[in-house]
Image (cartoon, rainbow, N blue to C red):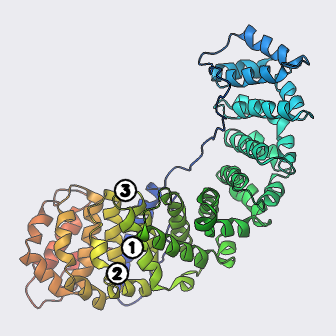
Amino acid sequence: MWGRRRRGAVPGPAGGAEELRARRREREAALRKARRQEQLVSKRLLREDEQDGAEVLLQPLPEDEVSELLRGVQRASEDRKTLLRRLRRALQDKETQQKFVRLDGSVRTLVGLFTGSLADVQMEAARCLHELSHSSDAAVAEACLPVTSYLLTYLSGHSVEFMELCLYTLGNLVVESEAVRKQLLPQGIIPVLASCIQSPHEAVLEGLGYVLSQLLQAKEAPTEIIPLVLDSVLPQHMLRLVCSGLKSGTGAAVEFAWCLHYIVCSHTANAALVALGAVPALTSLLCDIASEISQSFSEGLELLTCPVLRCLGNLLAEETGCEAQIQDERLLAALFTVMQCYLQKQPFIVPEGLWLLNNLTADDPFFCFALLSLDLLPALLQLLPCSQAASVLVLTVLCNVAEKGPAYCQQLHQRAALPLLLGPLALPDPEVVGQCLELLHLLFLHCPQAAVDFVGQGGPQTLKQHQSTPELQERVQALLDMALQPPGASVFSSSPAASSAFS
């Protein structure tokens, strides 16, 4: 999910320019709302290698065979472990899962063995329950309701393998069923997870992050789950584990980075995260990531980079006053290093980085000045053709810079931004062209020489290609009027149409 940069127009004497900003910001908000990605709800399956040579069943078992298998498991015998293994393989099929849970006493039998004293039988029963938890049928998940309290109980004092299995089973059940979530909350799942998060075992921490990330994506999370999380020790430990991911293993760090992202996107806890120091901590982590990937490409590190960029970008999108905590040019340099390193192999990182850059440059002139003083404008302009999303965001960042006034527009013009706009301006994409028009308007308004040079470079001919596009034609005509007016005329006052077209 993408956050929204909320910026209000400031009343002042330059009413036309401020109206322009307000309108552009409304369009940006709509753009980001449309680009929010679906939440990463998924299920995970832990399966040991089939070392005994038995084949995995690919066809559903007939109901009488499922019933016979259950009766065999229910009878106390030396073959119970072997029968549980056969049942586990059978439960890899969805139809067999459904047949099994419909049998009287089936889940109760597994729960009984799961809570028994024989460790090897207990583990096989846990694996059977794990297969059931992976079902896409909500009825199968809800049939497992009787086991939830035991899954929580066994998250302490057992082997790492057993705890990991319990965690992923819980996470799978949480995904599928609101009834399961409603049962787990009063059973104390949040305090149990808060206790587990101090485990020294990476596998346990990664499984815990999975459970928590699924809980935080639930529709009821903002009102029922996140307040409980904030009242626990989880947030500070999540932040610690995310920021130590480069040293202690990225698996858990990735899970907890997404957890932080979902909390930020709930718009209910950002002040608390800012108070914990999330912004400088994540900024420092991003600088470390940039240093790491600039020295050697680290496979898989993009999985951590993505949620870190989103957390920072969306924290900046809120009115939390955290901008002052990160006025450091090193963040800007690190951000461009990350985008350039991932441009070829992991290009999906580029829009994520540009989204953060957009929010860094939106209000505060510090990063706009730094963008120019560090000579990063050429690197930014090179990202224009990467993708449609990247083009829109690059142009939006340039608008943020141009909004800061004449000195910034003159810098953009002197650094040859104008010729590079003619390519995107010729595209048949109204969204990209519309953002180009906004930028051109700001350049013409604050740097009249840009309008003169635009005419000399054949810009009006490119503009005229869009005169028949309904959502663009008014602004196209206004820009043509501004660009083609007599020399020496005031760019803005001599073109009344521009005021209404760009407001």
Instruction: Give the mark nearest the N terminus, 3 or 2.
Output: 3
Q: Which mark is residue 201?
A: none
Which one is earlier in the sequence, the residue at label 1 or at label 2? Answer: 1
In the rendered view, would you say 450 is above or below 392?
below
Q: Which residue is mark 3?
A: 345
Placement of 491 over or under 458, stated as above or below: below
Whole-percent x and y of residue 393?
36, 66
Do the CB atoms of the residues marked 3 and 1 lie less than 8 Å apart?
no
Q: Nearer the viewer, residue 142 or 167?
A: 167
Three-letter code for the amino acid on which mark 3 is drawn: Lys
- Closest to the camera, between mark 1 and mark 2, is 1
Question: Disc 2 marks which amino acid?
Answer: Val
| Crowdedness near tag 3: few (<14), some (14–19) or many (≥20) residues, C-alpha within 10 Å | few
Q: Nearer the viewer, residue 242 or 412?
A: 242
Q: Residue at x 54, y 71 (%)?
A: 312
Task: Name the outermost residue toward the front.
Answer: 52
**Residue 41 percent coordinates (x, y):** 60, 46
* Tag in front: 3 or 2: 3
Does residue 480 appear left or right of residue 251 in this picture?
Answer: left
Callout 1 amino acid: Phe
Local crowd size for mark 1, using a 10 Å CA cut-off: few (<14), some (14–19), many (≥20): many
Marks 1 and 2, how far apart at CA: 16 Å
For label 1, the residue is: 336
Label 2 SS: helix
Q: Is residue 358 visible?
A: no
Secondary structure, mark 3, is loop
> Residue, x 85% and y 45% (percent of image)?
154
Q: Position of residue 42 (x, y in %)?
A: 60, 43
